[in-house]
């Protein structure tokens, strides 16, 4: 009981309440929460004192920036980063290459490290017969994409850690994922695998080399784009029907376990509901969003979503948290709020944003990449509870209430009798059971959650991958800007502005070249297609949230740079790497919208919107060529192409251009903008024409503003569709009626 009392006192202090313990005592000032403690592999040494190979304690990875590579810097394996030195050694010493690809928050990557890469016997064998290269897939998605394609071709599946054996000229001849320390269920131990590969290299090398050459030839003949007939509305209808067939009516989501959140697919379904009026599409999206939030995949104390659910019920997550999932789900819940006008969805938006602002934002404004699943050597330890722990912290009465709501039992629902918190009831029913109103019940529950959150903060936190990626930051900027606009939340828009300005200042050069990664004060690795495409999307949304023309200007400039660097003029699609980038064994194109949208899909979506901003048919043609270039792939897997289909839906229309003309900050202008906040408009782009100020900066991009300004000094709104504009709306009511005229 003492623990519960002191924890509550800590919460009251944290929330800023004044606490008076006894009459006559001074009031206590608010107390800051203790600083969290994070997992740490080792203290970084003074790099200037180390030899080029890292010395006896470290390997060459100690000189890298990637948190993932640094995690392996004190392994006994003589790791190399992906560089010329490693390949030169393989050629000089006639050794095959062992390539291991993963990322810092990957649970099974950690498992294989502890089991094999920290094992002296394994390290000795690797160092003697192989050249070992470690790659961070998030820093080098180009390398990962190529060799993951190899793995999927050879084994029918893929994942991380990705295990590749290849010749010194980078031709792969064996691929797999995780290998255990001892033989299990027919899967060889990692050391046994090394011995077999070494034997092949010594005694049957011609077969290995031939296999590698054949793989490269097969990959080279497949560019990733197979042009077919232009996409039409049938592709959209096919996607709708496939989602319906795979929908899990009971649990929400699509298919069975594991289940991924796929925020962009849920946004697509809401867009399609708006277009078709099919209520099933709306219900699938809203039900899934509620089910994911209620499940254990959501962190009910600290907020934010885990990467995926290992079961069909959204209960047991893979506990790592990725920035891109927060971004895509933030947008989906924002769309859901506009569609349903249910404050539940707005609350989730604010919670996700709070998590990102509190735990994932650098002092400079950029966003970190991820948080680990593991702490103290165990997956999920930071997030799970015994019932006894909760009762000790909250007290028996409040603890029982909390445990009932979040499904906490003596037996537990996870390993070792631990519990994953998940909401199991209905607010109104629980409120009735406890004899209070739903509002009072929610406040009570939030207060208890705060207490438990402050207690959890004393635990050792999972490690954080603090590198800042332009691509993932672009997604978060886009979603925060949109959410901030819809909720009229200046703090969200300010967070998006800080991040965008950070990227522009630190990761974009004067000639509009983008860098992929920033960490510890340094930008590095020239940007990939996804860096340009995702960041452009962020700037387009940020313009429509702030109407600051500099963001629209920069988006159009970066769009042109992207086309110059990545466009394949032969078919109009885009390579994932720039023309002057390092040449790998094959140059890939991609249109698959998986956990992340593809660069080509986002580029098409950007191009069609930029065309509608500018009135320039050239960019519309660019979008059309991208979509046609991947039309066969889209038709084969429409539910895996939802961002590409979003671009198609907008292009086929009807879509609208909305111009708000007015003096910034005046009541009549704000009233017009408020109409937009409360109206779900997936078929529109919005331009602001500032009345009473020079229009030349806007007019350089938006060519159709002539005559679409303020009227008699008052704000006006113009709704244009199919190159024809309605009469101007002189007040918010008329504007709202115009927007809903086709509903």
Image: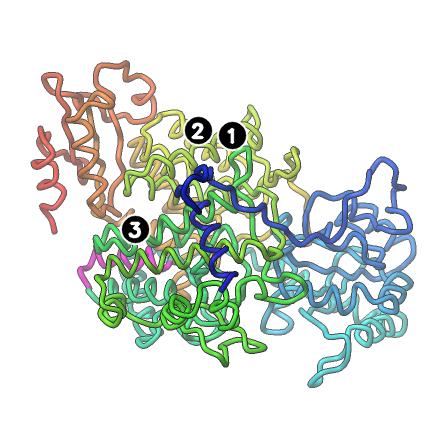
Residue indicated by mark 1? 504
- Please tell me the numbered disc located at residue 365: none
| Discs 2/3, front | 3
Assess disc 2: are there few (<14), some (14-19) or many (≥20) residues with their C-alpha within 10 Å of its C-alpha: some
Colour setup of the view: rainbow
Whether residue 4 appears in this view of the structure is yes
Whether residue 638 appears in this view of the structure is no
The residue sitting at 38% across, 69% down in the picture is: 397
In the rendered structure, the answer to whether residue 664 lies left or right of residue 414 reads left
Residue 136, horizontal then vertical, whole percent? 67, 52
Give the mark, 2 or 3, whose residue is nearer the N terminus: 3
The residue sitting at 19% across, 65% down in the picture is: 279
Residue indicated by mark 2? 554
Residue closest to the eye, 289 or 637: 289
Give the mark, 1 or 2, whose residue is nearer the N terminus: 1
Give the mark, 1 or 3, whose residue is nearer the N terminus: 3
Q: Are marks 1 and 2 in contact (CB under 8 Å)?
A: yes
Establish if 112 lies above or below 415.
above
In the rendered structure, the answer to whether residue 57 lies left or right of residue 465 reads right
| Discs 1/3, front | 3
In the rendered structure, the answer to whether residue 558 lies left or right of residue 174 reads left
Q: CA distance from mark 1 to mark 2?
A: 9 Å
Establish if 579 lies above or below 262.
above
Whether 270 is among the magenta residues is: yes
Q: Which residues are magenta?
A: 265-278
């Amino acid at each position: 009981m003492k623990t519960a009392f002191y924890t509550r006192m800590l919460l009251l202090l944290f929330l800023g309440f004044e606490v008076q313990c006894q009459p006559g005592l001074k009031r206590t000032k608010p107390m800051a929460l203790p600083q969290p403690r994070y997992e740490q592999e080792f203290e970084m040494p003074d790099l200037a004192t180390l030899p080029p190979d890292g010395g006896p304690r470290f390997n060459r990875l100690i000189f890298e920036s990637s948190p993932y590579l640094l995690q392996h810097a004190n392994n006994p394996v003589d790791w190399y980063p992906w560089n010329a030195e490693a390949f030169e050694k393989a050629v000089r010493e006639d050794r095959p290459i062992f390539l291991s690809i993963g990322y810092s928050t990957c649970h099974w990557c950690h498992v294989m490290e502890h089991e094999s890469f920290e094992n002296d016997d394994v390290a000795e064998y690797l160092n003697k017969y192989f050249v070992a290269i470690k790659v961070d897939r998030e820093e080098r998605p180009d390398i990962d994409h190529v060799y993951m394609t190899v793995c999927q071709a050879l084994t029918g599946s893929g994942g991380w850690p990705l295990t590749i054996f290849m010749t010194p000229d980078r031709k792969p001849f064996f691929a797999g994922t995780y290998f255990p320390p001892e033989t299990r269920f027919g899967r060889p131990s990692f050391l046994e695998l090394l011995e077999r590969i070494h034997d092949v290299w010594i005694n049957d090398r011609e077969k290995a080399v031939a296999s590698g050459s054949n793989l490269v030839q097969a990959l080279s003949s497949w560019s990733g784009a197979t042009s077919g007939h232009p996409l039409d509305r049938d592709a959209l209808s096919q996607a709708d029907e496939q989602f319906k067939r795979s929908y899990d009516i009971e649990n929400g989501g699509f298919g069975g376990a594991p289940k991924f959140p796929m925020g962009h697919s849920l946004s697509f379904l809401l867009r399609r509901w708006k277009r078709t009026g099919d209520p099933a599409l709306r219900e699938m999206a809203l039900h899934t969003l509620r089910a994911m939030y209620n499940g254990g995949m959501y962190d009910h104390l600290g907020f934010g979503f885990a990467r995926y659910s290992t079961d069909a019920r959204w209960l047991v997550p893979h506990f790592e948290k990725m920035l891109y999932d927060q971004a895509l789900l933030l947008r989906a819940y924002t769309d859901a709020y506009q569609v349903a006008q249910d404050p539940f969805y707005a609350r989730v938006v604010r919670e996700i944003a709070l998590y990102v602002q509190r735990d994932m934002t650098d002092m400079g404004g950029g966003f970190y990449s991820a948080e680990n699943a593991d702490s103290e050597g165990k997956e999920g330890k930071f997030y799970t509870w015994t019932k006894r722990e909760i009762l000790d912290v909250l007290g028996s009465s409040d603890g029982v209430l909390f445990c009932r709501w979040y499904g906490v039992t003596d037996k537990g629902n996870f390993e070792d009798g631990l519990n994953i918190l998940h909401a199991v009831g209905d607010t109104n029913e629980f409120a009735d059971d406890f004899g209070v109103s739903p509002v009072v019940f929610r406040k009570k529950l939030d207060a208890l959650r705060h207490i438990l959150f402050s207690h959890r903060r004393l635990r050792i936190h999972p490690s954080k991958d603090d590198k800042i990626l332009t691509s993932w930051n672009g997604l978060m900027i886009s979603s925060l800007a949109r959410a901030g606009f819809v909720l009229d939340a200046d703090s969200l828009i300010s967070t998006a502005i800080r991040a965008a300005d950070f990227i522009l200042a630190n990761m974009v050069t004067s000639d509009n070249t983008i860098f992929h990664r920033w960490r510890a004060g340094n930008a590095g690795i020239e940007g990939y297609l996804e860096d340009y495409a995702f960041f452009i999307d962020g700037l387009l949304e940020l313009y429509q949230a702030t109407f600051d023309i500099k963001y629209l200007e920069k988006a159009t400039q970066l769009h042109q740079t992207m086309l110059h660097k990545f466009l394949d003029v032969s078919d109009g699609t885009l390579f994932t790497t720039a023309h002057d980038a390092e040449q790998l064994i094959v140059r890939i194109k991609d249109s698959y919208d998986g956990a992340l949208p593809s660069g080509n899909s986002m580029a098409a979506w950007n191009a069609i919107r930029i065309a509608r901003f500018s009135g320039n048919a050239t960019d519309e043609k660019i979008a059309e060529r991208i979509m046609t270039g991947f039309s066969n792939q889209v038709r084969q897997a429409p539910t895996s192409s939802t961002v590409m289909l979003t671009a198609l839906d907008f292009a086929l229309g009807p879509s609208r251009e909305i111009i708000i003309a007015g003096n910034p900050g005046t009541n009549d202008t704000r009233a017009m903008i408020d109409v937009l906040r409360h109206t779900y408009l997936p078929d529109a782009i919005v331009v602001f024409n500032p009345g009473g100020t020079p229009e030349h900066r806007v007019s350089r991009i938006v060519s159709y503003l002539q005559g679409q300004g303020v009227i008699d000094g008052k704000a006006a709104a113009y709704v244009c569709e199919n190159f024809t504009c309605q009469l101007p709306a002189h007040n918010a009511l008329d504007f709202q009626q115009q927007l809903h005229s086709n509903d």
